[in-house]
Image (cartoon, rainbow, N blue to C red):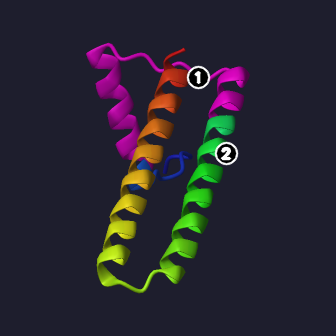
């Protein structure tokens, strides 16, 4: 018997991906403490913006009675959430690249 513990399917998949990345020449470098702090700050900022948008949407939705107005509010809310999420992800990607 071997003394090595059995690996989970997740660990095996991660090893295969790391091996494939190494073969393709992809380098993985750990994030610096500054990058981690910047990413956390960006996530907190956009989380607050998303919460603000949700509060505004809910207050406007409660006040609206017309179905057409409700549909418009829903579409605007979805667009705003998508925009903020895209901005957040792009900012985090820029931080990761350095």
Q: Quadrant of residue 51?
A: bottom right
- Residue 29 left/right relative to 78: right
- Residue 70 left/right relative to 58: left
Element carrying mark 2: helix
Q: Nearer the viewer, residue 12 or 97?
A: 97
x and y percentages locating residue 76 in the rendered image: 38, 59
Seen at 44% across and 54% down, the residue is: 81
Mark linked to residue 44? 2
Q: Nearer the viewer, residue 46 or 30?
A: 46
Closer to the camera: disc 2 or disc 1?
Answer: 2
* Above or below: residue 34 compared with residue 6: above
Name the N-terminal-most of marks 2 and 1.
1
Seen at 48% across and 53% down, the residue is: 6
Q: Quadrant of residue 34?
A: top right
| Quadrant in the picture for the C terminus | top right
Disc 2 packing (10 Å; few <14; some 14–19; many ≥20): few
Seen at 28% across and 18% down, the residue is: 23
Mark linked to residue 86? none
Q: Nearer the viewer, residue 72 or 38?
A: 72
x and y percentages locating residue 27 in the rendered image: 42, 16
Element carrying mark 1: loop
Instruction: Kindly identify which residue carries mark 1.
Output: 30
* Above or below: residue 28 compared with residue 41: above
Is residue 34 within the magenta segment? Answer: yes
x and y percentages locating residue 28 in the rendered image: 47, 21
Q: Which residues are magenta?
A: 11-39
């Amino acid at each position: 018997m071997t003394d090595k513990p059995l690996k989970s399917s997740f660990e095996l998949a991660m090893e295969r991906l790391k091996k494939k990345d190494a073969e393709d020449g992809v380098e993985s470098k750990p994030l610096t403490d500054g990058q981690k702090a910047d990413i956390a700050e960006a996530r907190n900022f956009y989380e607050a913006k998303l919460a603000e948008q949700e509060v505004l949407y809910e207050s406007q939705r409660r006040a609206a009675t017309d179905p057409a107005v409700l549909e418009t509010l829903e579409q605007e809310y979805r667009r705003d959430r998508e925009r903020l999420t895209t901005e957040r992800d792009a900012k985090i990607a820029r931080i990761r690249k350095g």
